[in-house]
Amino acid sequence: MYRVNVYIFFLYNILMDKIFSDKINILKALAIVLVVSGHLEFRFFDMFPPYSFQLALFFFISGMLFKEKYLDNAADFIKRRVKSLLLLYFLYSAFYAIVTIILAKLTGKFWGMDLNLYNFFVTPFLNGHQFDLSCPMWFVTQLFITMVTFLFLERMFRNLSTTKKSIIYTLMGFSAIPLSKVFPLTPVFLVIIRTMFSLFFVYLGHFYIKKIHGNYNIFTPKILGIVLCIQAVLWHFNRDFDPTHGIGLSYVLVWARFDSQIIVPVLTSITGIWFSLFFIELTYNYLKDIKFVRLIGENTYHIMANHLFVMYIITAVIFKLNGIPISERNTHNIYWIFNPVQNTYLYFILTMIITTYTGVFLKRIKKRLPVIKDF
């Protein structure tokens, strides 16, 4: 009987791990969908604009996945993050350097900063906008900085109580915005502000897994009502009530642009993260069996890296079909799409399909090439 109980317990843990892994993957899929839709300026959840929380959601997910075993092996953690984040980042940077040069020859516009060693190796860690077509990848280097910082802070704080750690990270997150308004945003200080802000959400994700998940039900009707009421109040701090603008409660973390807000970006990030978790709880039984959703979650890196380039290609094809010279594209910024009123959702669907299967294709190539199979 004892062996049977142990076996049942073992199977139960495997099942719970599988469900947790699936939910994380769907949450990642949702986060990257929000990034792409945000760049196309439309929303899935009108009350929760993508730019008000989607990057905080990615940091939150990273905190959920952080393993404390690395507290005693920082070198291994950094090595793994270099392999999983930075190596592919610089491969993509080299690719987009070539693409940008080719486009400059074809269209007469260089979509990026000057090509030099500083912009190739240093700028990625400052703002990540050395090439316009791959500028969403600024998040990758910031994630690396944030997670390595989080590791060393956790090593420093390992003897502190949960309450004291929570206070420290909360002060860090909430003070980032006021500090960004007091001191000049030099390139280095900009990184510090982004890191302070993002560390709070990494800790929040880690805290959620350790203290809340599996212990408390935070998805009750009462809590839903409270979150919706809070969000309704936060809308009164909206910087733009014109629904055609698509801004809502958004902030631009890469440049630490929070407008006149002090705490609203932190609060909208928290409500948006909660609503995302709530959405996954509601839809898990349906979404878990959809292969394409699973593939999106497994290829968020490639979607992040390539979606602006794919949008550019879609625009080029539309221009060709309509007899418009591609040089006309040069008069708009990198996020511009052709006739958004009619084409926004076409861009979205095609971009998600192409970038997702680009990731699938690249992973298959990686498995077949012994030289890079360990990347």
Image: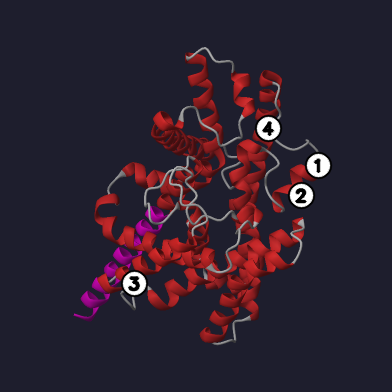
Q: Main secondary structure of the magenta part?
A: helix
Looking at the image, which residue is at 60% across and 52% down?
A: 139
Q: Mark 2 and mark 1 in contact (Cβ < 8 Å)?
A: yes
Q: How many marks?
A: 4
Q: Nearer the viewer, residue 375 or 2?
A: 375
Q: Earlier in the sequence, mark 2 or mark 4?
A: 4
Looking at the image, which residue is at 27% across and 76% down?
A: 6
Q: CA distance from mark 2 to mark 3?
A: 44 Å
Q: Which residue is mark 3?
A: 226
Q: Quadrant of residue 276?
A: bottom left
Q: Which residue is mark 4?
A: 111
Other residues around mark 3 within 10 Å, as few (<14) / some (14–19) / many (≥20): few
Q: CA distance from mark 3 to mark 4?
A: 45 Å
Q: Which kind of residue does numbered mark 4 sit on?
A: Trp
Q: Which mark is residue 117?
A: 1
Q: CA distance from mark 1 to mark 3?
A: 51 Å
Q: Earlier in the sequence, mark 4 or mark 1?
A: 4
Image depth: mark 4 or mark 1 in front: 4
Q: Nearer the viewer, residue 59 or 346?
A: 346
Query: In the image, which residues are magenta?
Result: 1-27
Q: Secondary structure at mark 3?
A: helix
Q: Nearer the viewer, residue 53 or 371?
A: 53
Q: Earlier in the sequence, mark 1 or mark 3?
A: 1
Q: Which mark is residue 214?
A: none
Other residues around mark 1 within 10 Å, as few (<14) / some (14–19) / many (≥20): few
Residue 55, given in percent of the width and then of the height, sits at: 52, 56
Q: Which residue is mark 2?
A: 122
User: Does the magenta-highlighted stretch encompass residue 76?
Assistant: no
| Left or right of 293, for residue 375 | right
Q: Secondary structure at mark 2?
A: loop
